[in-house]
Amino acid sequence: MALTLITIETARPGLYEFTDRAAAFVVESGMREGLLTVFVRHTSCSLVIQENADPDVRRDLDGFFRRLVPPADDPAMGWVRHTAEGPDDMPAHIKAALTQTSLGVPVADGRMLLGTWQGLYLFEHRARAHRREIVLHVASG
């Protein structure tokens, strides 16, 4: 079993890839077979496994979520009560609830078994910069 904490500095909403850092952790752990668990320690961002070849995929995904859950000052969001931290706060919590805060990735032969075009991403939902912590844990199965 191995565990580490990585930090990702975000500047704005969007997807921040950390596949290489997770892959390096798996190699350094010496684990040949098992499961990598990825967990984000926040409630206004999330984790996704998504295509890492075409940046348009990330832009389109971010655009979809902006339209699905607009800021709290949008007239469509007049029902929102939690606005103490700004108009992006409650929408960020909703987006995080619609995605995931934890991912599991199989490990075999000392590497993650992601598909050819898959990458691990922190999905930042807040408008201002944040310092996000992600726990990586690999254990044998």
Image (cartoon, rainbow, N blue to C red):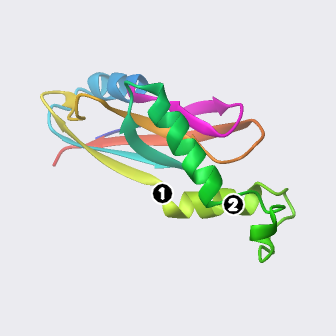
Q: What is the number of the mark on residue 91? A: 2
Residue 71: horizontal and vertical position, in percent? 76, 57
132 with respect to 50 (left or right): right
107 with respect to 64 (left or right): left
Residue 35: horizontal and vertical position, in percent? 24, 45
- Residue 49: image quadrant is top left
Magenta span: chief secondary structure: strand
Q: What is the number of the mark on residue 67? A: none
The residue stretch that appears in magenta: 5-19
Residue 72: horizontal and vertical position, in percent? 79, 63
> Gap in Å between the C-alphas at discs 1 and 2?
13 Å
Q: Residue at x 57, y 43 (%)?
A: 62
Residue 95: horizontal and vertical position, in percent? 58, 58
Above/below status of 111 relative to 35: above
Q: Nearer the viewer, residue 41 or 78?
A: 78
- Residue 80: image quadrant is bottom right
Q: Mark 1: give few (<14), some (14-19) or many (20+) Cα within 10 Å.
A: few
Q: Give the residue type that dot 1 points to.
A: Thr
Q: Nearer the viewer, residue 139 or 72?
A: 72
Q: Nearer the viewer, residue 56 or 38?
A: 56
Q: Which of pointers 1 and 2 lies earlier in the amino acid sequence? A: 2
Q: Which residue has dot 1 on it? A: 99
Which quarter shows the N terminus? Answer: top left
